[in-house]
Amino acid sequence: MITISLDQGPAKHLENGVTAGQALKELGVPEDRRVVAARVNGVSVDLDSVLEGDCAISPIRVDTPEGLETMRHSASHVMAEAVKSLFPGVKFAIGPAIESGFYYDFDVPEPFNPEDLEKIEARMGKLIARDLPFIREEVDREEAIRRFREQGETYKVELLEELPLPRVSLYRQGDFIDLCRGPHIPSTGYIGAVKLTGISGAYWRGDERNPMLQRLYGTAFSTPEELARHLELLEEAKRRDHRRLGRELGLFSIEDEAGPGLVIYHPKGAILRSLIEDFERREHLKRGYQMVMGPQILKADLWQRSGHMDNYRDLMYFCEVEGQTYGIKPMNCVAHMLIYKSKVRSYRELPMRLFELGTVLRHERSGVLHGLTRVRQFTQDDAHILCTPEQVESEIAGVLDFVSEVMAIFGFEYEVELSTRPEKSIGTDTEWELATNALINALKTRNLPFAVCAGEGAFYGPKIDVKLKDALQRRWQCATIQCDFTLPERFDLTYVGADGGRHRPVMLHRVILGSLERFMGVLVEHFAGAFPVWLAPVQAILLPITDRVHAYAREVAAALLDANLRVEVDERPETLRYKIREAQLQKIPYMIIMGDREAAQGTLAPRLRDGTEWKDMPLEAFKARLQEESRIPSPKK
Ligand SMILES: [Zn+2]
Ligand SMILES: [Zn+2]
């Protein structure tokens, strides 16, 4: 007999050799197809795995991230089985669960096409209906190599040859066998709903010197309703895709001719960008930051001194000028160090907050570039705070307040993560403790809940990351607050303290919105292109019905432009219907249709995006309204 206890629940004496599933039942966990696996002494196992010795057990349900992952990974095996039965001669690589589904990489003679996807999905449906059990078998590694080699599964053989284990586990369902650690759901019928979502090419092990494989993506949920909701969200995300909207709204383009990851701002995008920049300057000046600007290129020796040559060289671009090597800046810190160092500093000057809308270049691999959210040239709302050790905590709290106000202005919720000391790090224990405690205390005084990412800090200091949540509940990195022990050392920064002695200042790097490019991409998707009036590149468009009112339209436009409002007149000889349609597609907040009646009365009939209309509105009243709505909203707490 062995003693098996349920997590924080009853314990029972059961026969040695009982399965995990039986033990859960004995311990009173109701039999339920939402239980897909079990955790035994902290390790995830199949429900039919045999328990030997005393242990603690708990069910893994499909409505937890781990349970869902187990089901999706099982679905990838079912997809592989379907592919095996439909495409003879296919070789199997790997098939993991990923964030919102799963994939499997196949070596097939012909690339898959969309019709193949439908066939594979239909076959998976049949395999799921047959409710085939997943059966685990443990064999010697040599035996597994022999079996897979016999079947010509060269990728599996390669994986096995690198596994430093004497024995490995295989999983079989139907006539498909895979090398797999498990665990799996008990049988294929536990998959509630499945959908194949895409095809792409993928090099074996991500290395372009290896063969190109075909990667099939899919997702699975425990009920058809959950799958339907997920697919709706995907559709919605596609509808809001900033790359498509960016083109349609005339915001930006990224051209092959110019190079990947290099953003070209078109007129509407340039306006949006400068609105955000104006906002940034105002908000920073208000909070005691000083504006500075550094050069785009700095001598390589300086990058050596800052440590960037050792740690960021692969991400940097270089150029030669008069026999001297320069590095194009991947970060804005270095020039700020030189500003601090330009004269003897007193403790009375601290905290010193140097702010720059700094444009940086980083050589990201072309494979990871994506619209505005991952680019090679971008501008950060970057600041460096130099302060005394006593000031660190209140400075961090000030940055947290800044973040909270800015997020409220744009209407974003956000989450906070604290990353602590990694294994490889510089700085003394005292420094790390001081900095980490300052971050924690600041978070606590602001009542901000935070997740701890243990050991995920940079080697030169701990940090806080802020992830904003957009309208589709997706998380995006925005603000970071980073303590740095290296740069003040490397640049030998000092200040004269109240005691007359020289001291080392503490340095914080921080951004609020982060990359303005990424933030704009997020804004476009969050608002689905329908920006609030204060951010809209064009706030109102005037649509004269006949040539007779063109003069009146220009007069109105001039008055609005003069009041710093952003308006356009559509005088093209198109039908009104066409112009209205176009203004709607451009998602312009106000459309103002003008006929003889308005011209004669000197009034306006503005129409909102939601269809609301006003008749006979005096120009002054409309102007006042638009001016009011153009103001930056005050942060609501
Ligand atoms: Zn597997
Ligand atoms: Zn920095």
Image: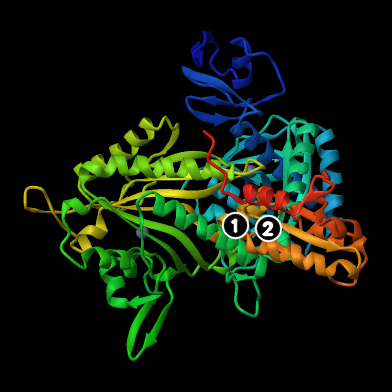
Q: Residue at coordinates 81% horizontally, 57% vertically from top-left?
A: 602
Using residue 634 as the reference point, say whether residue 211 is left or right of it. right
Q: CA distance from mark 2 to mark 1?
A: 9 Å
Q: The residue under label 2 is which amino acid type?
A: His
Q: Position of residue 205 (x, y in %)?
A: 57, 60
Using the rendered image of the protein, determine whether residue 13 is visible from the camera's viewpoint.
yes
Viewer-closest of 511 and 348: 348
Give the class, few, some or many, for how many residues have Cα within 10 Å of label 1's Cα (few <14, many ≥20): many
Label number found at residue 520:
1
Q: Residue at x 43, y 75 (%)?
A: 317
Q: Which residue lies most toward the left here? A: 500
Residue 541 point in image, percent of width and height: 77, 60
Q: Is residue 60 above or below residue 209?
A: above
Residue 542 location, x and y as percent? 79, 61
Amino acid on which disc 1 is placed? Met
Which numbered disc covers residue 628? none
Q: Is mark 2 within 8 Å of ligand 2?
A: no
Tag in front: 2 or 1: 1
Residue 270 lies in what quarter of the image? bottom right
**Left of 335 or right of it: where is 139?**
right
The structure residue drawn at horizontal position 42% and vertical position 40%, both measured from the top left corner, is 401
Query: In the rendered structure, which disc, 2 or 1, sits on the residue that comes first in sequence?
Result: 2
The answer to whether the beta carbon of the residue marked 1 is less than 8 Å from any atom of ligand 2 is no
Q: Is residue 153 above or below residue 123?
A: below
Q: Are marks 2 and 1 in contact (CB under 8 Å)?
A: yes
Residue 87 visible: no
**Which residue is found at the position 51% from the left and 49% from the top?**
477
SS for dot 1: helix
> In front here: 385 or 3?
385
Residue assigned mark 2:
242
Identify the element where label 2 is drawn.
Answer: helix
Q: x%, y% of residue 457?
A: 36, 47
